[in-house]
């Protein structure tokens, strides 16, 4: 039985994309993962904008604030307004 690198069974051309190489099931999993990550990114942006932040503000916060401080805000939400 032929399998892709991730172990999906490849029974024939129908299990590959039109490029003839890419596993259809891997592609589907990759697309699902990508869509979940994209949805999470948009939720992050909406949350930031909801607090009056710009995209630049949100990126600066994520890039520069100590992770421990951000995690503390998740545990104690009132810290976020301090
Ligand atoms: Zn696969």
Image (cartoon, helix red, strand yellow):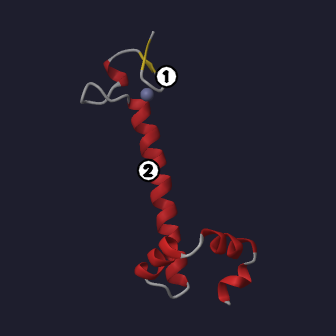
- Given residues 9 and 62, the one toward you in this image is 62
Q: Quadrant of the N terminus?
A: top left
Pointer 1 residue Cβ closer than 8 Å to ligand 1: yes
Indicate the quadrant where residue 71 lies: bottom right
Labelled disc at residue 45: none
Q: In the rendered image, which residue does mark 1 sit on? A: 7
Q: Quadrant of the C terminus?
A: bottom right
The residue drawn where x is 46% and y is 77% is 60
Disc nearer the start of the sequence (1/2): 1
Residue lying furthest top: 1
Coordinates of residue 39 in the picture (x, y in percent): 49, 60
Q: Secondary structure at mark 1?
A: loop
Image height check: is 44 above or below 36?
below
Report x, y in % for residue 49: 49, 82
Respond yes or no on whether mark 2 lies under 8 Å from ligand 1: no
Name the one closer to the observer, 26 or 60: 60
Residue 3 or 72: which is nearer the viewer?
Answer: 72
Q: How many discs mark residues in the rendered view?
A: 2
Q: Residue at x 66, y 83 (%)?
A: 80
Look at the picture and state if 66 lies above or below 29: below
Residue farthest along the right direction in this orientation: 76
11 horizontally vs 67: left or right: left
Quadrant assignment, res 73: bottom right
Label placed on residue 34: 2
């Amino acid at each position: 039985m032929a399998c892709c690198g991730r172990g999906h069974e490849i029974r024939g051309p129908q299990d590959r994309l039109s490029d003839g190489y890419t596993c259809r099931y891997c592609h589907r999993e990759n697309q699902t993962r990508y869509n979940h990550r994209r949805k999470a990114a948009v939720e992050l942006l909406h949350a930031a904008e909801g607090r009056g932040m710009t995209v630049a503000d949100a990126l600066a916060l994520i890039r520069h604030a100590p992770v421990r401080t951000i995690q503390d805000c998740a545990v104690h939400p009132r810290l976020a307004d301090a």
